[in-house]
Amino acid sequence: MAEHISRKELKQDKIKETIEHGAEAVISHGQFASIVVAIALVLAIGYGGWHFYIDRQTAQAAIGLGEATKAYQGRIGTSPNPADSSVPTYPDEKARAQDAWSKFLKVANSYPSTNPGKLARYYAALCLEDLDRQNQALEELKKISSSSDKELASMAQYQMAIIDVRTGKNDDGIKLLRALADKPSALVPRPLVLLELAGALRASNPKEATSIYQQIKKEFPDTNISEQADRGLDSISPKS
């Protein structure tokens, strides 16, 4: 009988042990699940907080960009425009470009990771060009041209080409324009690039310039670009 009880007790101990281990497993699993939930919650809060931070930074950058753009488009004159007092007035173009540049640069430096901040840096480079600081403008545009943003990079390359042509570096400018014509973007469309390319070639290679102007008229008839191509053709000497 004692032996029977002993076996029964042993069996009960086994059951008890199994239950205890099972309980420990459930508790352990519950703790693990709680930890996972806690981590997920922290990540979610962090993700939401990060997006809130980025959204807030972008909104602030957009406001700054708007103010800088007002300066960039400011009125040249001796007195403010009574019809729109929000439009700033400047004594000359240099003063306007200087004020716009400082405003764009502030936005670019304060919010470099936002889209408005990146666009502000591009416009800051344009202001440097307006201030006859072409070398600095080219340096900034070159940095922007390597951006992962295809549209922004194309805009920078297009402006670099224009500066090159204006400063006597025709070969460099023409090379950039040919590349942009082969790979146009939404903000730097093919007809615009072709028109600029034809203008750059007009003096050195009037035959090719004529061909490009005619190509523009054929590919983009009944457009403002086509009318500009007509004027370009008229400006080329008949002897060419």
Image (cartoon, helix red, strand yellow):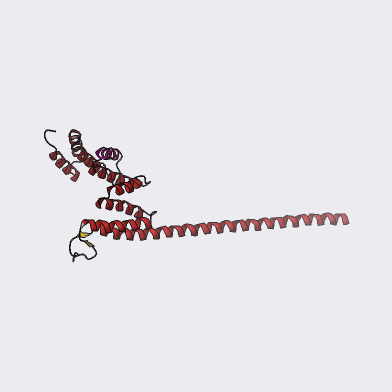
The residue depicted at 30 percent of the width and 51 percent of the height is 125
As rendered, which of 109 and 66 lies closer to the eye? 109
Q: Is most of the magenta stretch helix, strand or loop?
A: helix
Residue 76 at x, y = what percent? 19, 59
Residue 18 at x, y = what percent? 73, 55
If the image is split into quadrants, where does the C terminus sit? Answer: top left
The residue depicted at 61 percent of the width and 56 percent of the height is 32
Q: Is residue 223 left or right of residue 119?
A: left
**Image quadrant of residue 216?**
top left
**Image quadrant of residue 192?**
top left
Residue 178 at x, y = what percent? 27, 37
Does residue 1 appear in this view? no
If the image is split into quadrants, where does the N terminus sit? Answer: bottom right
Q: Any magenta on residue 169?
A: yes
Residue range (magenta): 168-176
Does residue 100 appear in this view? yes
The residue depicted at 25 percent of the width and 44 percent of the height is 162
Residue 88 at x, y = what percent? 23, 62
As rendered, which of 183 and 1 lies closer to the eye? 183
Q: Any magenta on residue 79?
A: no
